[in-house]
């Protein structure tokens, strides 16, 4: 009956099949897997039916099946059985092997015997060789062939390092009187002899003691002397226990695998043995360690990957820098590597360490991507911060570009280095120089971009200022600007800490120089293509509308619009000339000369070509032909400025001249001369009225001319004309009021003359009438001629008619007086005729027809 607690289990069946499931059950049941490497294996070999199972059961209380004496000599134990010696430390495992020289298997079948012998040797620390006392010395008894087998297989166990096994010969049925020492010597001698005879290949010269610690124990017949047998077995147990205790016989447990791997190890060994391969125990141990450490490592790695903290960290690192990344990862790694160390404690040092290294590097590998992501975040964060800082510093303009850039670079590099160090994982020796270099490169390009931007802005300002200023020395000024030393030295000083390689630094500066030229060329191209007309027009407007002191021109004075227009066009043409070609070299050209001669002076027109003389097509910005077209457009589009100025000029002149004319008119009508004339005219015609008035008017006109001298000639002349005629009309109006006086004065003079004449003797009436008609009419006409303007026919004809009628009436009355003294109608008729003729004759001189209607 098997004892439950020892759990005797068949490890290898009689047919040679390994029983892993049973072994696993056994291991678990007896908690063998908890023993670490602190365990011992004791195996027993020997002829079939030699009491092996009986001995093991007495020694370790293992409960192996024993042959029942009543059943006779039949094989009991098949294959290999395993059991645990309960209640002893360290854990002791007993192996009971199928008996050798089995008649059951037949003579030839030594293969299985050798296989289990090899297996027993490989796994056990103590090998008990059970033999009958009576068989000692007998050549063919099972003891010797068994020993031979053991020695032979021993050689297959090790190639290099021997494993030392304690061989205890257990001599059964030792007669009580047989001397033990003799027996012991004999056995040891035989063993030595056997050792010497066996071929040991590589270990030919190795002494037996290197491989085996040979001991001899004799036991009394169990059947006959049970008590003695039991006492002797108790002593043997003690010896075994002493051996397996710490510091005991087999302290050397180099090749041992952890108990938890016994199953794996045993199974694997048996597999190898069955394939008839040699068993390399250290290699086997390495194999087990490899398998197990691999398993542990895989498991730990899985745990690590699933670690909550690690997952959170990884996720967090996806989106941004994680604070204390290095510390956290280091601590997680430390935890899991420690777990590995704990679990892999008993495995082969080399394997354990190498697997640990692999685990560590796998863990680090998986952390590396996150670490890189982390560095990327740090880099972009630092870069972003740098950009803002630099921009702000430049905007504040507290220092030079170079000092701003250097400060920002230094603080960015310092922060970045510190953050990278903080992100470093203790277990790794990762170098962040590559991302650091990238950071440097990015800072450098940021500095470069800013510097280029600043340069470009300042160049643009320069170009615009030059174009605004007339573009006279445009290219000379640009060349000076480009060659300014401080431009390059400031740039190189700004980047010197980011690029320590002299050659690359030189190249960068050279690139910048090229960039600067390129910016100039591009700016010039852009201006030529898009803005030249704008600049020309702006320049034209500036020169045309402002004088040399930048004071806006006032067009109320005598402005020479034509000259100013020419000056303004010349100034604009200089811009066109500057923009026509790139002149970064000092090579002279005749563009300006050609443009002036053909567009300003219009002496010649060589602007039909597509090229400028001595200017490469690469440097040509505006071809001669296009210059001509642009000029045409420019003239057309600036014409309105000239026109506007002209019309303004006229408008202002008109307003001013009008005002002056009004003033002059008022001045005239309030002048003493005029007021006297006007006063005189109230009582009658004023002789020389027109002449006097014209003289006053001339003075005022001359004053007017003086005052309007600076204004447009046409305007001032036309206004002079206007106000002059207004003044004349005004005076004329006054004069016309004197005409009735003139008329009555002329009649009075006619009457008086005629009266005086009639008093004289011999004076013919008709001749007097004729004379005085003529003289009165003459007086009247002369008075009319004194008007400031020639009087219109309408103004005087009625007066003249009245004068004629009055004179005729008077003359007729005078003749009538004569008629009253006449005797006949014929005479009266004659006088009447005479009077009519006389008046007609008097008037004839004035071309006035006389029709008598009465
Ligand atoms: N003479 C003698 N017989 C013994 C002794 N011990 C046991 N026996 C008897 O020998 C027989 C075989 O005993 P086992 O212990 O089964 O022997 P075994 O070597 O395990 O046998 P197999 O497993 O078949 O190889 C049994 O009948 C035992 O009673 C002993 O010390 N002397
Ligand atoms: Mg047995």
Image: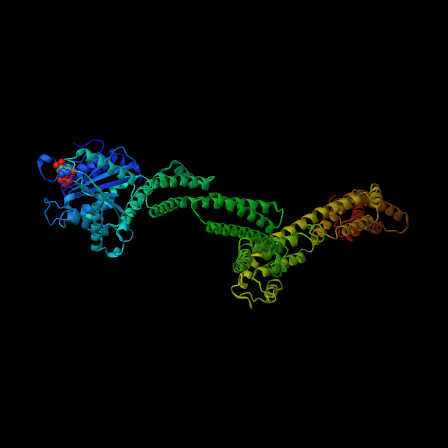
- Depth check: give the residue in front, 28 or 819: 28
- Depth check: give the residue in front, 689 or 759: 689
> In the image, 207: left or right of 814?
left
Could you tell me residue 817's position as x and y percent?
Answer: 84, 43
Could you tell me residue 724's position as x and y percent?
Answer: 75, 49
Could you tell me residue 657's position as x and y percent?
Answer: 72, 48
Quadrant in which the N terminus appears: top left
> In the image, 185: left or right of 36?
left
View quadrant of ligand 1: top left
Q: Is residue 472 above or below residue 354?
A: below
> In the image, 187: left or right of 486?
left
Quadrant in which the C terminus appears: top right
- Depth check: give the residue in front, 97 or 246: 246
> In the image, 417: left or right of 346?
right
- Depth check: give the residue in front, 71 or 585: 71
Quadrant of the rendered image containing residue 745 = top right
Q: Is residue 272 visible?
A: no
Count of all numbered marks drawn on residues in the image: 0
Could you tell me residue 734's position as x and y percent?
Answer: 78, 43
């Amino acid at each position: 009956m098997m004892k439950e607690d020892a759990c005797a289990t068949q490890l290898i069946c009689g047919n040679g099949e390994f029983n892993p499931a049973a072994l696993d059950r056994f291991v678990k049941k007896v908690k063998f897997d908890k023993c670490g490497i602190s365990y011992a294996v004791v195996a027993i070999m020997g002829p079939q039916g030699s009491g092996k199972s009986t001995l093991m059961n007495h020694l370790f209380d293992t409960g192996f099946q024993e042959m029942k004496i009543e059943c006779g000599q039949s094989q009991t134990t098949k294959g290999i059985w395993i059991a645990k010696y309960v209640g002893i430390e360290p854990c002791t495992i007993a192996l009971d092997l199928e008996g050798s020289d089995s008649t059951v298997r037949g003579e030839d079948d030594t293969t299985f015997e050798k296989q289990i012998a090899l297996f027993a040797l490989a796994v056990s620390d103590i090998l008990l060789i059970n033999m009958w006392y009576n068989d000692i010395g007998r050549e063919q008894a099972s003891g010797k062939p068994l020993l031979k087998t053991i020695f032979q297989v021993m050689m297959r166990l090790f190639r290099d390092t021997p494993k030392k096994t304690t061989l205890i010969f257990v001599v059964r049925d030792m007669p009580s009187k047989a001397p033990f020492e003799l027996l012991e010597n004999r056995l040891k001698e035989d063993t030595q002899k056997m050792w010497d005879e066996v071929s040991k290949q590589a270990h030919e010269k190795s002494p037996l003691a290197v491989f085996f610690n040979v001991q001899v124990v004799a036991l009394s017949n169990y059947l006959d002397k049970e008590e003695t047998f039991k006492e002797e077995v108790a002593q043997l147990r003690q010896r075994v226990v002493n051996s397996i205790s710490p510091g005991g016989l087999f302290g050397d447990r180099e090749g041992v695998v952890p108990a938890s791997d016994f199953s794996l190890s045993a199974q694997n060994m048996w597999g190898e043995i069955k394939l008839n391969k040699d068993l390399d125990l250290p290699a086997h141990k390495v194999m087990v360690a490899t398998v197990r450490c691999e398993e542990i490592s895989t498991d730990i790695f899985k745990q690590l990957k699933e670690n909550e903290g690690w997952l959170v960290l990884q996720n967090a690192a996806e989106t941004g820098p994680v604070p204390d990344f290095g510390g956290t990862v280091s601590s997680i790694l430390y935890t899991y590597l420690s777990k590995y160390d704990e679990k892999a404690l008993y495995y082969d040092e080399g394997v354990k360490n190498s697997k640990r290294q692999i685990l560590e590097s796998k863990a680090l590998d998986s952390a590396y991507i996150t670490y890189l992501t982390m560095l990327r975040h740090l880099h972009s964060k630092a870069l972003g911060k740098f950009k803002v800082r630099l921009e702000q510093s430049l905007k504040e303009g507290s220092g030079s570009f170079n000092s701003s850039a250097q400060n920002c670079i230094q603080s960015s590099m310092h922060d970045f280095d510190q953050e990278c160090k903080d992100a470093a994982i203790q277990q790794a020796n990762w170098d962040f120089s590559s991302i650091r270099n990238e950071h440097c490169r990015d800072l450098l390009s940021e500095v470069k971009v800013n510097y280029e931007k600043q340069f470009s802005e300042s160049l643009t300002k320069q170009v615009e200022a030059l174009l605004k200023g007339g573009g006279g020395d445009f290219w000379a000024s640009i060349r000076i600007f480009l060659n300014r030393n401080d431009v390059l030295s400031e740039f190189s000083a700004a980047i010197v800490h980011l690029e320590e390689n002299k050659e690359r630094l030189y190249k960068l500066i050279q690139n910048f120089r090229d960039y600067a030229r390129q910016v100039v060329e591009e700016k010039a191209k852009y201006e030529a293509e898009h803005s030249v007309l704008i600049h020309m027009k702006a320049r034209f407007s500036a020169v045309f509308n402002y004088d040399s002191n930048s004071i806006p021109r006032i067009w109320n004075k005598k402005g020479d619009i034509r000259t100013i227009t020419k000056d303004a066009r010349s100034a604009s043409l200089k811009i066109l000339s500057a923009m026509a070609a790139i002149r970064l070299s000092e090579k002279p050209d005749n563009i300006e000369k050609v443009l002036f001669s053909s567009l300003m002076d219009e002496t010649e027109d060589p602007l039909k070509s597509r090229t400028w003389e001595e200017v490469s097509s690469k440097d040509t910005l505006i071809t001669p032909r296009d210059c001509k077209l642009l000029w045409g457009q420019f003239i057309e589009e600036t014409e309105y400025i000239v026109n506007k100025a002209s019309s303004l000029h006229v408008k202002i002149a008109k307003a001013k001249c009008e005002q002056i004319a009004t003033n002059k008119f008022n001045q005239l009508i309030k002048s003493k001369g005029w007021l006297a004339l006007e006063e005189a005219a109230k009582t009658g015609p004023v002789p020389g009225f027109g002449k006097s008035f014209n003289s006053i008017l001339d003075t005022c006109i001359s004053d007017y001319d003086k005052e309007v001298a600076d204004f447009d000639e046409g305007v001032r002349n036309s206004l002079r004309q206007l106000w002059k005629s207004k003044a004349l009309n005004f005076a004329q109006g006054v004069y016309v009021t004197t005409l009735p006086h003139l008329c009555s004065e002329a009649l009075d003079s006619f009457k008086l003359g005629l009266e005086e004449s009639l008093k004289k003797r011999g004076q013919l009436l008709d001749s007097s009438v004729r004379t005085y008609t003529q003289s009165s009419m003459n007086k009247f006409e002369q008075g009319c001629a004194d008007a400031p303007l020639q009087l219109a026919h309408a103004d005087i004809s009625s007066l003249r008619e009245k004068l004629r009628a009055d004179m005729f009436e008077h003359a007729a009355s005078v003749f009538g007086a004569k008629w009253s003294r006449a005797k006949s109608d014929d005479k009266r008729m004659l006088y009447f005729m005479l009077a009519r003729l006389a008046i007609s004759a008097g008037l004839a001189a004035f071309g006035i027809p006389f029709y008598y209607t009465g």
